[in-house]
Amino acid sequence: MRPFEGRRILLGITGGIASYKSVTVARLLTQAGAEVDVVMTRAAQEFVGAITFEAVTGRRIYTDIFGAGNALDHIKLAREASIFVVAPATADFLARAAHGMADDLLTACLLANTSPVLLVPAMNDRMWANAQTKQNLRQLRNLGYKVLDPDEGPLAVGEGSGPGRMPEPEAIVAEIGRVLEPRTRLAGLKIVVTAGATREAIDPVRFISNHSTGKMGVALAQAAWRRGAEVTLVAGHIDVPSPHGVDAIHVETVSEMKDSIEEILPSTDVLIMAAAPADFRPSSPATRKIKKESQKSGPPKPIELAETEDILATTRSARKKGSIVIGFALETEDLLNNSAKKLEQKGLDLIVANSAVDEGTGFGGDTNRVTILSAGGAIEEIAMMKKTEVADLILDRVEALLNGR
């Protein structure tokens, strides 16, 4: 999984209750293809056993700076690391790191390290707010270390809720991926991605929608953020969490999606329309729930439909000059011809076409097989792959277009 495959990650664990989350961090990184070397402080081993990390990484766990055969571990581990991550980073560790101490294996590794450093603090909210902790964090940031601020939420039992909670493992892994990803043409650009299904009301409890889960759009948003872009996700109903680091705007109807896009489009460098907005809506939604009893005198009354707004067409005049616009086309027949028409009619740079009826493609699944058509007439057929891989492939094509302008 990009950008983890074959990368060496040095993961430090210090002595806080949040260290239980670090097991999942190590597992996710290993599953993504990284080699994870775990260094545990003595205090960390009071919370989680070293054998637990060995089980999820399949690698030796490092705990001691002294002892036969350990003398150069801090040099070897630091030299081989692609990134140095400490999660959780306790107030004690932050203080020692800020003052250049090397009184255990983890801090010795830090002094020998030359790779990027990501610190993930976790502690009680009062310790997080302490002036000495703040001073230590300023010093660490001045040294060039990246610090992922803690979340607000429930703390240890009896301590209530507040800032100090370690972010969830998925967020930490996403941050690691952004550090590891080489800076690309997308870095600093404003990218808008749409995802999911819209819902058009029939009455207060029913609606017209489709089977879109939002997986493709969310994968695109996450991959664009990982490459350094400022990403806004405009999402209808999605069955997956909004990605970390991305500004999310949640909408219900096609009209709401159009309005949101129209507002931010003038400052948008790349628009990727991966959502599945409804083509039709009830022309006169009922203000009360339609009851079966009201239909007993005859057959159910038909629901009259009206066309929804064409988002790409109606917002065309709001596009930023020189921006890239990508559309999606999901078809049940005549895929290439229908997609080519949409590409031309809506003034797109690329359109990503896929079938709604082929096995392993379309709504719901984790894979897709797409064909990419360009405004210049090129047609590129892509083999079946994971939607996360399709997302990176599409963004590669976006970068090529940007480089050509």
Image: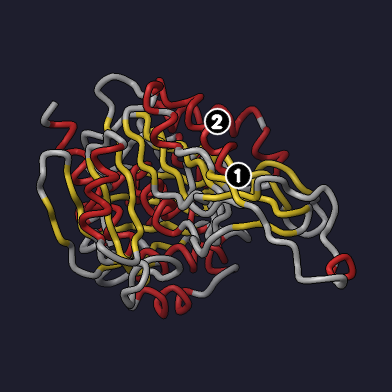
Q: Secondary structure at mark 1?
A: loop
**Residue 351 appears at what percent x and percent y?**
26, 47
On screen, residue 46 versus residue 358, left or right, reads: right
Which amino acid type is marked by label 2? Asp
How far is the residue under mark 1 from the one under mark 2?
A: 10 Å
On screen, residue 33 versus residue 140, left or right, reads: left
**Residue found 50% across the figure and 50% down from its top:** 279
Nearer the observer, 60 or 4: 4
Q: Secondary structure at mark 2?
A: helix
The N terminus sits in image quarter:
bottom left
**Residue 84 appears at what percent x and percent y?**
34, 50
What residue did someone put label 1 on? 253
**Residue found 53% across the figure and 68% down from its top:** 45
The C terminus sits in image quarter:
top left
**Residue 49 appears at what percent x and percent y?**
52, 75
**Residue found 55% across the figure and 27% down from its top:** 135
**Residue 172 appears at what percent x and percent y?**
46, 52
On screen, residue 67 versus residue 279, left or right, reads: left
Q: Does residue 19 appear in the picture of this structure?
A: yes
Q: Name above or below for residue 224 compared with residue 393.
A: above
Q: Farthest residue in the right direction?
A: 293
On screen, residue 167 versus residue 201, left or right, reads: left
Q: Residues within 10 Å of mark 1 (few under 14, many from 20)?
A: many
**Residue found 20% across the figure and 46% down from its top:** 396
For the residues bearing labels 1 and 2, Cβ distance under 8 angstroms: no
Nearer the observer, 248 or 138: 248
Which amino acid type is marked by label 1? Thr
What residue did someone put label 2 on? 259
Q: Does residue 183 appear in the picture of this structure?
A: no
Based on the displayed image, in which of its 4 quarters is residue 364 positioned? bottom left
Numbered mark located on residue 90 in the image: none
Nearer the observer, 375 or 49: 375
